[in-house]
Amino acid sequence: LKHPIINMVAEKLGKTPAQVALRWGLQMGHSVLPKSTNETRIKENFDVSGWSIPEDFLAKFSEIQQVSI
Protein backbone atom coordinates (compact mmCIF):
# COMPACT_ATOMS: atom_id res chain seq x y z
CA LEU A 1 0.00 0.00 0.00
CA LYS A 2 3.04 2.25 0.14
CA HIS A 3 4.12 1.69 -3.47
CA PRO A 4 4.38 4.98 -5.41
CA ILE A 5 2.18 3.72 -8.25
CA ILE A 6 -0.64 2.71 -5.90
CA ASN A 7 -0.38 6.04 -4.10
CA MET A 8 -0.36 8.01 -7.37
CA VAL A 9 -3.49 6.22 -8.61
CA ALA A 10 -5.20 6.69 -5.25
CA GLU A 11 -4.44 10.40 -5.24
CA LYS A 12 -5.66 10.89 -8.82
CA LEU A 13 -8.92 9.00 -8.09
CA GLY A 14 -9.52 10.52 -4.65
CA LYS A 15 -9.40 7.10 -2.99
CA THR A 16 -7.21 5.47 -0.37
CA PRO A 17 -4.36 3.16 -1.40
CA ALA A 18 -6.27 0.27 0.20
CA GLN A 19 -9.37 1.04 -1.88
CA VAL A 20 -7.26 1.12 -5.04
CA ALA A 21 -5.62 -2.21 -4.18
CA LEU A 22 -8.99 -3.82 -3.46
CA ARG A 23 -10.54 -2.39 -6.63
CA TRP A 24 -7.57 -3.59 -8.70
CA GLY A 25 -8.05 -7.11 -7.35
CA LEU A 26 -11.74 -7.06 -8.20
CA GLN A 27 -11.15 -5.67 -11.69
CA MET A 28 -8.58 -8.40 -12.31
CA GLY A 29 -11.20 -11.02 -11.39
CA HIS A 30 -9.67 -12.02 -8.07
CA SER A 31 -11.47 -12.65 -4.81
CA VAL A 32 -10.42 -10.11 -2.22
CA LEU A 33 -10.72 -10.60 1.51
CA PRO A 34 -10.04 -7.33 3.31
CA LYS A 35 -9.65 -7.47 7.06
CA SER A 36 -9.82 -4.69 9.60
CA THR A 37 -11.16 -4.00 13.06
CA ASN A 38 -11.05 -0.25 12.46
CA GLU A 39 -14.58 1.02 11.72
CA THR A 40 -13.40 3.74 9.33
CA ARG A 41 -11.32 1.28 7.31
CA ILE A 42 -14.17 -1.21 7.19
CA LYS A 43 -16.42 1.47 5.68
CA GLU A 44 -13.70 2.42 3.18
CA ASN A 45 -13.30 -1.24 2.20
CA PHE A 46 -16.99 -1.39 1.28
CA ASP A 47 -16.63 1.66 -0.98
CA VAL A 48 -14.99 -0.17 -3.88
CA SER A 49 -18.03 -0.51 -6.14
CA GLY A 50 -19.56 2.14 -8.34
CA TRP A 51 -16.17 3.20 -9.71
CA SER A 52 -13.31 1.59 -11.56
CA ILE A 53 -9.66 2.18 -12.23
CA PRO A 54 -9.24 3.58 -15.77
CA GLU A 55 -7.28 1.45 -18.24
CA ASP A 56 -4.33 3.86 -18.41
CA PHE A 57 -3.88 3.59 -14.64
CA LEU A 58 -4.38 -0.20 -14.71
CA ALA A 59 -1.47 -0.44 -17.13
CA LYS A 60 0.75 1.20 -14.51
CA PHE A 61 0.18 -1.74 -12.15
CA SER A 62 2.19 -3.99 -14.48
CA GLU A 63 5.22 -1.82 -13.70
CA ILE A 64 5.17 -2.97 -10.07
CA GLN A 65 7.94 -5.53 -9.63
CA GLN A 66 6.81 -8.77 -8.00
CA VAL A 67 8.87 -9.95 -5.04
CA SER A 68 9.14 -13.58 -4.02
CA ILE A 69 9.32 -14.32 -0.34
Image (cartoon, helix red, strand yellow):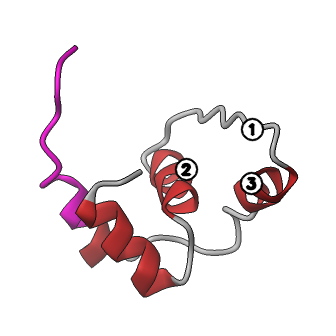
**x and y percentages locating residue 1 in the rendered image:** 41, 51
Stretch in magenta: 59-69
Residue 63 included in the magenta stretch of the image: yes
Q: Secondary structure at mark 3?
A: helix
In the drawing, does residue 39 fall left or right of residue 66?
A: right
User: In this rendering, which labeled residue sits more in front, label 2 or label 1?
Assistant: 1
Disc 1 residue type (three-letter): Ser
CB under 8 Å between discs 3 and 1? yes
Which quarter shows the C terminus?
Answer: top left
Which of the marked residues, 2 or 1, is nearer the chain's N terminus?
2
Residue 36: which numbered mark, if any?
A: 1
* Residue assigned mark 3: 41
Answer above or below: position of 1 versus 7: above
Label count reads 3
At label 3, counting other C-alpha atoms closer than 10 Å, the crowd grade (few under 14, some 14-19, many 20 or more) is some
- State yes or no: residue 6 in magenta: no
Residue 18 in the image: state x and y as whole percent. 54, 55
Left of 58 or right of it: where is 68? left
Question: Is residue 48 left or right of 14 when viewed as pictured?
Answer: right
Task: Provide the residue designation for mark 2.
Answer: 22
Secondary structure beneath dot 1 equals loop
- Callout 1 environment at 10 Å: few (<14), some (14 to 19), or many (20+)? few
